[in-house]
Image (cartoon, helix red, strand yellow):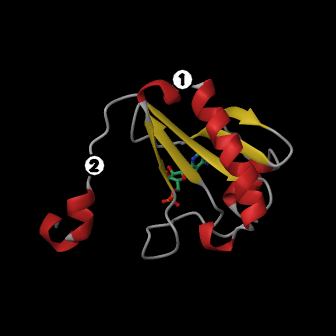
Amino acid sequence: MCIFCKIVNNEIPSNKVLEDDEFLAFHDINPIAPIHILVIPKVHVENFQEIDPSLMAKMTSFIQKVASMLELDKNGYRLITNNGRDGGQEVGHLHFHLVGGTKLKWHRFNDAHPKESL
Ligand code: AMP
């Protein structure tokens, strides 16, 4: 069973922020910003490419709720999902990184020319 399914089933611990019947938000174990939350569907979905749009619609509301709860809606935040190998996805259970709590830098140009940042 995948690591995030184990978190859903409380087989491994997580620092939860918000939960309902279908979704869970918890703190990333290795944060890249003052606030770094992972939001997942409880059902196992491999990645963004695989999610049913009707479930994604509900997930959108849930993510917005988490952002408001943490007051990230006031100054802004970044929402990221890494999709598949080339997208840098390491855990094969759909998750959105909700990142904020500071003015974030934007590494777009490094990503566009990855060899230049080696
Ligand atoms: P990605 O590279 O997009 O697949 O991101 C996976 C994320 O999961 C990383 O940011 C990890 O720090 C995070 N992560 C892995 N295991 C755990 C865990 N047990 N609890 C919380 N976050 C985790």
Asked if residue 15 can be seen in this view, the reply is no
Q: Residue furthest left?
A: 116
The amino acid type, in three-letter code, at marker 2 is Trp
The residue sitting at 64% across, 47% down in the picture is 39
Q: Is mark 1 within 8 Å of ligand 1?
A: no
Q: Nearer the viewer, residue 60 or 105?
A: 60
Q: Position of residue 41 (x, y in %)?
A: 73, 54
Residue 64 visible to the viewer: yes
Q: Quadrant of residue 48?
A: bottom right
Quadrant showing the N terminus:
bottom right
Q: Is residue 65 above or below residue 47?
A: above
Mark 1 falls on what kind of element?
loop
Specify the farthest residue to the bottom: 85
Amino acid type for the residue under numbered disc 1: Glu
Q: Residue at x 75, y 68 (%)?
A: 52
* Residue 16 location, quadrant: top right
Q: Position of residue 103 (x, y in %)?
A: 31, 32
Element type at mark 2: loop
Residue on which the image places disc 2: 106
How many discs mark residues in the rendered view?
2
Quadrant the C terminus occupies: bottom left
